[in-house]
Amino acid sequence: MNQYIYKSATELASLIRDGKATSVDIVKEHLDRIRKINDKLNALISIFEKEALQEAISCDNEAKAGKFRGPLHGVPITIKEQFWIKGKKSNTNFKMLKHFVAPEDAVIVDRIRKSGAIILGQTNVPKNLLDYQVAGDLYPEGVNPYNLEYSPGGSTGGGAAALAAGLTPLELGGDFGGSIRVPANFCGLYGMKPTEKTIPLHGNMPLPENANTFILHMVQAGPLARTLDDVELLWKIIVGPHESDRNIPDINWQKATNKELSDYKLAWTDSWPGFETSTPISNAIKALTDTLKSKGCKIEKKIPDETLHRDSLKTFVGLFPYIIAQGVPWFIRPLIKMQLFSGFLKGMKKEFPYLLKPLNRGFKMNANHYGEMMLQRSMITQRWENFFKEYDFLICPVSFGPSYKRCKIGSKLNYDGKEMIYINYVWPFVGCFNASGNPSVTIPLGLGEEGLPIGIQIVGKYWSEMELLHVAKKVAALTSGFVKPKNWE
């Protein structure tokens, strides 16, 4: 019988600290579960069994002597494959990077080690992190533990599947276009995309040979977990400035208040202009907001001005090429664009003609255009911040519906009687907040009729994470929270 599977990282840390459990037993139990289940899910693509057990022995010896490294002393964790782990391969499931070996730990991986956590292995990702499914050149395809025919989300899909199936209590993910929030949503978890430029980026991506550029916008590392306490715990470990990244300010994080839900003024929406959600998602959001109203919360259906969401998407696509094609020879960039239009962005030319101009200009890597996009980004961020002067937080969808069946990238998707191009199912609901940089927390609302998780995200102003987590816990207490997938006991 499993003693420790599905216990939270916070609980496990407490058991170790109180001498009621050993790190060796906890790690062994998770490794046993990985051996039994992982080949059905392809959630982890590498397992550090020997190193993890050795580290667990060291943690137990230290605990016996009353010494603890930090808040995760002896607790297992998994790491999304994109992050550097010294001496381990990191290649984002892409054959052109298959030989990249991390020369050192990423800054945040180093912080996780120093917190006392024990790395069990690396989790599966889609090719180049550019999909809401988990398939690529090098690893077997990842699946959703609630239904193996469905996607676990991307790009932190392997980590989300591992959490939902009880292979790990905690996962370090990354979000570039929803890559934390979507897998958390598809697998019934909590996840947080922190405010941009609050977590160091050094070692957060494998680098091509002779790489000499480093442009990263709209990208942020963050936690996924089965409880919000665990999300908060890991966030506090990885957040904050580091000498390797002078762009991370030393923020004076304000402690959360003791406010009740009735003290907040919340906005909510179940759609954006031109982007409706499915009936199940809309109904779930409406049911939640009705519950919040019954608790005395001041909440109204409200979005910023009609153009802000659209302008945010334009900003995203205008900056997108600078991140994915930086340092690439000019004659290769058209090939990258062609692959995108035949896959992930298939149908976008017809559906979103207004997005083509900023995307095409971005692929030309023009300094003037880059400056224009950064100015535009600053302006849309300020417009979102102005909205959060009127409302404390915004509740909104993460996707059109629950997870979708695994399919060829770029396929049209059908749900709730509506057919749509591939990216419409997810990206418009999450990419807007990568463009603005605002923090967001996902909350599961239980399982829909198909037995698949559904959820929402709560978005806040810059640097509001402490209060955002506080209100998220209040909201989560009114929901069913994480629900274990069946057939994995």
Image (spheres, rainbow, N blue to C red):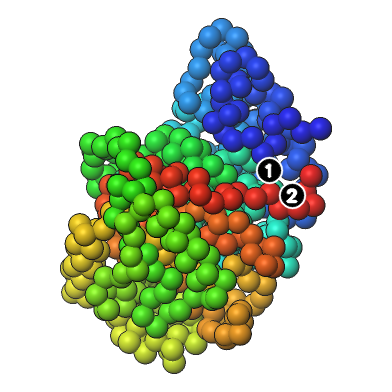
Is 249 displayed left or right of 236 in the figure?
Answer: left
Above or below, 162 against 23 in this view is: below
Question: Residue 146: horizontal and vertical position, in percent?
Answer: 70, 58
Above or below, 98 against 30 in this view is: below
Above or below, 327 against 109 in this view is: below
Kindly indicate whether the residue at mark 1 contacts the one at mark 2 (C-beta within 8 angstroms).
yes
Q: Is any part of residue 360 visible from this angle?
A: no
- Quarter where residue 310 is shown: bottom left
For this rendering, which residue is in front, 458 or 355? 458
Q: Which residue is mark 2?
A: 38
For the N terminus, the quadrant is top right
Give the total of numbered labels. 2
Neighbour class for label 1 at 10 Å: few (<14), some, many (≥20)? many
Question: Residue 342: horizontal and vertical position, in percent?
Answer: 54, 84
Q: Is any part of residue 355 visible from this angle?
A: yes
Q: Which residue is mark 1?
A: 167
What's the amino acid at mark 1? Answer: Leu
For this rendering, which residue is in front, 272 or 26? 272
Residue at 48% of width from left, 26% of height from top?
71
Mark nearest the camera among 2 and 1 is 1
Q: From this viewpoint, which residue is outermost toward the top?
A: 65
Question: Residue 156: horizontal and vertical position, in percent?
Answer: 55, 55
Residue at 39% of width from left, 36% of height from top?
236
Secondary element under disc 2, as helix, strand or loop, is helix
- Quarter where residue 21 is shown: top right
For the C terminus, the quadrant is top right
Neighbour class for label 2 at 10 Å: few (<14), some, many (≥20)? some
The answer to which of marks 2 and 1 sits earlier in the sequence is: 2
Question: Residue 443: horizontal and vertical position, in percent?
Answer: 50, 53
Is 70 displayed left or right of 41 in the figure?
Answer: left
What's the amino acid at mark 2? Answer: Asn
Residue at 45% of width from left, 79% of height from top?
276
